[in-house]
Amino acid sequence: MSHPAPARPLRARPPDRPLRGEVSVPGDKSISHRALMFGALAIGSTDITGLLEGEDVLRTAAAMRLLGAQVERLGPGHWRVAGRGIGALTEPGDVLDMGNSGTAARLICGLLAGHALFAVMTGDASLRRRPMGRVTEPLSATGARFWTRAGGRLPLAVQGVGDPLPLDYRVPVPSAQVKSACLLAGLCARGVTRVIEPEPTRDHTENMLRHFGARLHVGEEGRGRVIELLGQPELSAAPVVVPGDPSSAAFLLVAALLVPGSRLLIRHVGLNPLRAGAIATLQEMGADITVLAPRVAGGEPVGDLAVAASPLRAVDVPAERAPAMIDEYPILAVAAAAAAGTSRFRGLAELRVKESDRLLGTAELLRAAGIRAEIDGDDLIVHGSGGAIPGGGVVATRMDHRLAMSGLVLGLAARQGMTVDDGSFIDTSFPGFADLLAEAAGAPVVAAA
């Protein structure tokens, strides 16, 4: 079982000078998870460079080892996975402990459904509160059986099947995790697995399926997409270069936008169009952000981001943009707090089932800084200060790494700084976050509270 780390209160203060220089962010978490999983399913050895070595991804690496793959670290961000092939994962001899990672837990459910093995999965206190029924319900149609606590929550047990039925599933609400879990189960099924999504969501799974040699077709249906995967392919090991995580880059973008005089260059950031909603939103707010040297690495578009401090204006963000920036709303709300006017972020029901009730947590984060924020149904309304943020409050992070980092960035722009009640979860997605801010500021700006 996961045991909670001791709380680590942190305080951020405005820096003495602008943020400057060239920085890199950790590898994309979504791609890192998938690289380890597909490496475990492929024939041969997959070399991965730029892998995010945060706690969430390390849990996935440990799970792949328990399922029979050989996973070794060769150096910083450089890993090698010797795969077992489709349908050849082995029954784990211990519980799969996914820590805080909802992505890993839900995707691995898809892997387990298509293998004739029994497994038990758990996670930390935060993950054990998050519903898993959104994946176990469709995956049960493969013939796999799932047992969970009330409300579809972890711990979870699964009895997979060696000859799963292919799925034909319409995802009720946009979710890359549900789509990916269904496709991973479909790898082991005879025939074609078909997944229909109402709005396009991040397509890292589809890109990586192609990269490893699977046959799939992606078509359009209204505003959404239809993905058809031919089951039981032979995946061949292929090198994966993991780009910088755009969700992590968003924290540095907003920090540079809000600290007067700042200019940063963020190197090698993933720019998948289904992940770029935050950049588009910030640019609509008047942010000076430029993409330099666009290129493709490992099947994913990447580029360098040049950002300069800018006065921001309020924005009204449509609900259909949510899948392209679902993890960035807390830090976008921080940008809105400094903007002139009232911003509205629409259709955020999905935020209620993230690591925390992230919608409520984001509103409370802003209020702790003296910014008026309201929740109207599933919309977040932020009354911007035009740049004058009082600060001085304490952010309840709710075991949520993105709320913690957003609170620290807010502290850089608030007159009295900001305190977060627990920064211990930051390392799940952005190890070295405080050190990177110190590098850009020329001195530490985050300290123990």
Image (cartoon, rainbow, N blue to C red):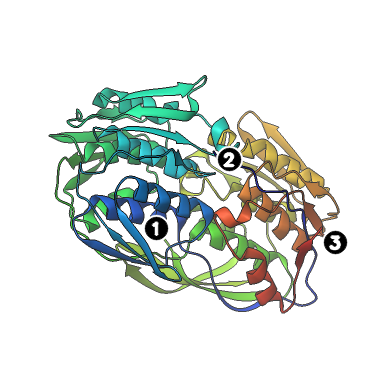
Residue bearing mark 3: 415
Labels 2 & 1 near each other (Cβ < 8 A): no
Query: Circle 2: is it few (<14), some (14-19), or many (20+) Cα within 10 Å?
Result: many
Upstream in the sequence, badge 2 or badge 3? 2
Query: Circle 3: is it few (<14), some (14-19), or many (20+) Cα within 10 Å?
Result: some
State whether residue 405 is above or below residue 48. Answer: above
Examine the image and state in which quarter residue 136 appears: top left
**In the image shown, does 396 or 42 lie closer to the viewer?**
42
Q: Secondary structure at mark 1?
A: loop
Mark-to-mark CA distance, 2 and 1:
23 Å
Q: Amino acid at mark 1?
A: Asn
Residue 355 circle label = 2
**In the image shown, does 247 or 433 lie closer to the viewer?**
433
Q: Position of residue 240 (x, y in %)?
A: 31, 64
Mark-to-mark CA distance, 1 and 3:
35 Å
Mark-to-mark CA distance, 2 and 3:
29 Å
Q: Is residue 412 visible?
A: yes
Q: Amino acid at mark 3?
A: Arg
Residue 272 circle label = 1
Q: Secondary structure at mark 3?
A: loop
Residue at 52% across, 59% down: 279
